[in-house]
Structure formats: structure tokens, C-alpha cells
Image (cartoon, rainbow, N blue to C red):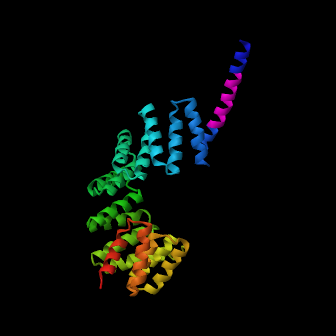
């Protein structure tokens, strides 16, 4: 009898040590594989540990194991239907696996509990955008702006939808508001310049491209180089634009946007085959590059 008791004590002590190690592994953020293993041990010891399901789900999400992430967040929700972090996490997982309908449903649950959740309106709006429901997208971005009128990203996003749906005056208004809130954000001038160009207002588009050029002049990252290339192309300096596009691609050879811009520059310079090659590469890297697809169709259909 004493032997059985002694064995039981040893087993309990060993389990406690293992549990402490598992807890530490589960809670750490450096290695997601270790986090998954540690959380699995924690869950095995306590199948109702909601936090461990949440943590393991996040680790799966970071490793792009989207189905496993959804399963763990779902289990956490079953155990605690009021766990808003689980709904948010599952919404993100659905989003990343391009299941936009379910992502919208999860974000909606959290919004119902927290109507002023600015970022969730942006997230839900983006899901509607990817589903092609632009009116619902604008409604969500507008709600985000109502909750925080000084959030620059909301104006940037809503301006993009207004532009896409040819509501150019509203797009210009949103980009102008972005420029007021964050004058150093060169995206405001790039996108507003593009809208002005679409409506034939070359005076204002030229001014915006000049501002874009000034703001990116001292920057040395790929994003700045390809924006500078775009501004120079629009200002009628294709050779200088090409140099900047090349520089952007030295930093990031697989930057689909930089390839698209270089393709447009090559087209402007009459280098049709080089332009076609860049548009094809851009689409291979990111099939959602509609502008590259349109340009490719235009160039390949031309005799």
C-alpha cells in the first residue's frame, strides 16, 4: 500500500514538473512549434484551458496552419462563448484562408459587444470589399471614421473604394483629409494625383506628383523608390523613372508593384516585350494585380 502511495506521489510530482515546462513553452512567443507542443500538453492536462486553445490557435495562425487555427479558436468559443479574443482570432484565420463570409460573421459578433471597435469595422469592411460588396465596404469604413474621425488609414481605404466605384469627388475628399491628418503620408498624393489624372485635372495631378516626389526624395527603401518612379513617369521623365524602378527591384526583386510600374515605364518608352515580361512576372507573383492583367491584355492583343 505504501509503495502504491509512493508511486502516486512520484507520478504527481513528475506531472507537475512537466506541466510547468509545458506552461512555459505554451506561453513563449519565440518558437511557434514549441508553443504548439507546450499548449497541447497544457490542454491534455486541462481540456478546459481556453487560453491554451487561444495561444495554440495563434501559433497555428502564424505558421499558416489556418484550418488548425480555426479548430482551436472554435473549441475556445465552445468553452467560453464570450471569449471575444477567440472570435477575433477565428475571424483573422478565416480571413487568411479567404473564407470572407465566416470572417464577417466573427467580426460582427465582436462588434456587437464593442460597437466602437474601430479596427474591426476596417477588418469587416475589407472582407466585404474582397467579396465585391462595395456599398457594405463603404458603410463599415464610414462607421470606423465616425468612431475615430482622425484615423488616416480609414480615409485611405474608403478613398480607394470611392475611386474604384468612380465616385471621384468623394475619393479626392478622402485623400485630402488623409493629407490633412498625416501630411507626410505620400500615399495621399499618389492616389489623389491618380484620381485627378482620371478626371483630366492635370494641374492638380501634377502638383500632387511633385509633392510625392519631394516626400520620397530622401528615402532609400523599395516602397519609396517605386513611388518615386511612378511620380517621375507621370511627370514625363520615363528614363529617370526607370532608374528608380530598377532600384526598387534591387531591394525587392519580387515586388509585384515595382514590376508593374517598370512595365508601364517600358511601355511608355516603346519597349513592348520588356513591358509584357514585367506584367507577366507581376501577375505570377500576385494574380490579383488587375492593372497588370489589363496592361498585358492591351499589349498582347495589339498587332
Looking at the magenta stretch, what is its main secondary structure?
A: helix
> Residue 17 vs residue 266: left or right?
right
Q: Quadrant of the N terminus?
A: top right
Let me know if residue 234 is in the magenta part: no
Instruction: Estimate the x, y position of residue 53 in percent, counting from the top left.
Output: 51, 38
Instruction: Estimate the x, y position of residue 284 in percent, counting from the top left.
Output: 43, 69
Residue 113, relative to residue 149: is it above or below?
above
Q: Quadrant of the C terminus?
A: bottom left
Instruction: Estimate the x, y position of residue 56 in percent, counting from the top left.
Output: 53, 41
Q: Nearer the viewer, residue 190 or 89?
A: 89
Instruction: Estimate the x, y position of residue 199 in percent, counting from the top left.
Output: 27, 75
- Residue at the top extreme? 1
Q: Which residues are magenta?
A: 9-22
Residue 148, relative to residue 175: is it above or below?
above
Q: Nearer the viewer, residue 257 or 1?
A: 1
Look at 33% across and 80% down and name the residue there: 299
User: In this orientation, does residue 48 appear?
Assistant: yes
Q: Where on the picture, by quarter, is residue 7?
A: top right
Let me know if residue 16 is in the magenta part: yes
Look at 51% across and 46% down and name the residue there: 60
Amino acid at each position: 500500500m505504501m509503495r502504491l502511495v509512493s508511486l502516486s506521489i512520484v507520478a504527481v510530482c513528475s506531472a507537475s514538473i512537466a506541466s510547468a515546462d509545458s506552461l512555459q513553452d505554451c506561453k513563449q512567443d519565440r518558437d511557434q512549434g514549441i508553443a504548439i507542443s507546450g499548449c497541447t500538453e497544457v490542454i491534455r492536462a486541462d481540456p478546459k484551458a481556453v487560453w491554451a486553445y487561444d495561444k495554440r490557435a495563434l501559433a497555428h495562425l502564424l505558421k499558416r496552419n489556418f484550418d488548425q487555427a480555426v479548430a482551436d479558436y472554435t473549441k475556445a468559443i465552445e468553452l467560453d462563448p464570450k471569449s471575444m479574443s477567440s472570435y477575433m482570432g477565428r475571424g483573422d484565420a478565416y480571413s487568411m484562408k479567404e473564407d470572407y463570409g465566416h470572417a464577417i460573421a466573427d467580426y460582427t459578433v465582436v462588434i456587437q459587444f464593442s460597437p466602437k471597435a474601430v479596427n474591426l469595422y476596417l477588418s469587416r469592411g475589407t472582407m466585404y470589399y474582397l467579396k465585391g460588396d462595395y456599398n457594405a465596404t463603404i458603410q463599415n469604413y464610414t462607421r470606423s471614421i465616425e468612431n475615430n474621425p482622425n484615423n488616416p488609414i480609414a480615409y485611405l481605404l474608403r478613398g480607394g473604394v470611392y475611386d474604384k466605384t468612380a465616385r471621384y469627388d468623394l475619393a479626392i475628399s478622402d485623400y485630402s483629409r488623409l493629407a490633412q491628418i498625416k501630411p507626410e503620408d505620400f500615399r495621399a498624393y499618389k492616389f489623389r494625383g491618380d484620381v485627378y489624372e482620371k478626371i483630366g485635372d492635370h494641374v492638380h495631378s501634377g502638383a500632387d506628383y511633385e509633392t510625392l516626389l519631394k516626400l520620397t526624395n530622401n528615402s532609400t527603401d523599395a516602397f519609396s523608390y517605386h513611388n518615386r518612379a511612378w511620380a517621375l513617369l507621370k511627370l514625363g521623365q520615363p528614363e529617370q523613372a526607370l532608374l528608380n524602378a530598377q532600384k526598387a527591384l534591387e531591394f525587392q526583386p519580387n515586388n509585384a508593384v515595382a514590376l508593374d510600374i517598370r512595365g508601364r515605364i517600358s511601355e511608355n518608352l516603346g519597349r513592348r516585350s520588356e513591358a509584357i515580361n514585367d506584367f507577366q512576372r507581376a501577375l505570377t507573383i500576385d494574380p490579383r494585380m488587375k492593372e497588370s492583367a489589363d496592361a498585358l491584355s492591351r499589349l498582347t492583343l495589339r498587332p
